[in-house]
Amino acid sequence: MTKLLDKTALPAAASPNVTPTRAFRRVGASAYLLDHYLISMAPSTLAKLASIGGGPSFLKAGRYPVYPIEALDSWARERISPLVKSTADLKMRGVA
């Protein structure tokens, strides 16, 4: 079972614009992406993307990255293509 954090577990000064109600550390974020979007993303890959960019937005709770569910959902939806009937549909839409 993955650990959930509530907003009381996050530092108030982490980001004045974001107050997540639920968030995950990297292992939980990885499991959430697989369970909800079938996106297989290892915790180490999330760590790499946090360094080079291109991953989901996160907050820092002390030294630990914390991924709000809203940020994971938004990032995952950007990576998923629209529903198609063939791979040719992807090429026609400029997705492939």
Image: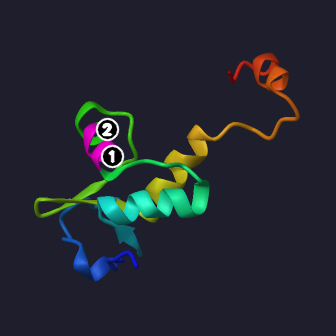
Q: Give the left or right position of residue 66, taking residue 34 as reference.
A: left
Q: How is the image coloured?
A: rainbow
Toward which corner of the image does residue 22 lie, by quadrant?
bottom left
> For the magenta stretch, what is the residue range?
44-48
Label 2 Cα neighbours within 10 Å, binned few <14 / some 14-19 / many ≥20: some
Q: Position of residue 31 (x, y in %)?
A: 44, 63
Residue found at the far left of this picture: 63
Please name the residue that numbered disc 1 is placed on: 46
Label 1 Cα neighbours within 10 Å, binned few <14 / some 14-19 / many ≥20: some
Q: Give the left or right position of residue 22, taking residue 8 as reference.
A: right
Residue found at x 88% / y 35%: 85
Q: Position of residue 53 (x, y in %)?
A: 32, 33
Q: CA distance from mark 1 to mark 2?
A: 5 Å
Residue found at x 85% / y 29%: 86
Q: Amino acid at mark 2?
A: Leu
Image quadrant holding the C terminus, namely top right
Please name the residue that numbered disc 2 is placed on: 49
Q: Is residue 18 visible?
A: no
User: Contact, CB < 8 Å: mark 1 with mark 2?
Assistant: yes
Residue found at the far right of this picture: 85
Q: Is residue 25 above or below residue 22?
A: above
Q: Is residue 30 visible?
A: yes
Q: Is residue 41 above or below residue 66?
A: above
Depth check, front residue: 87 or 10: 87
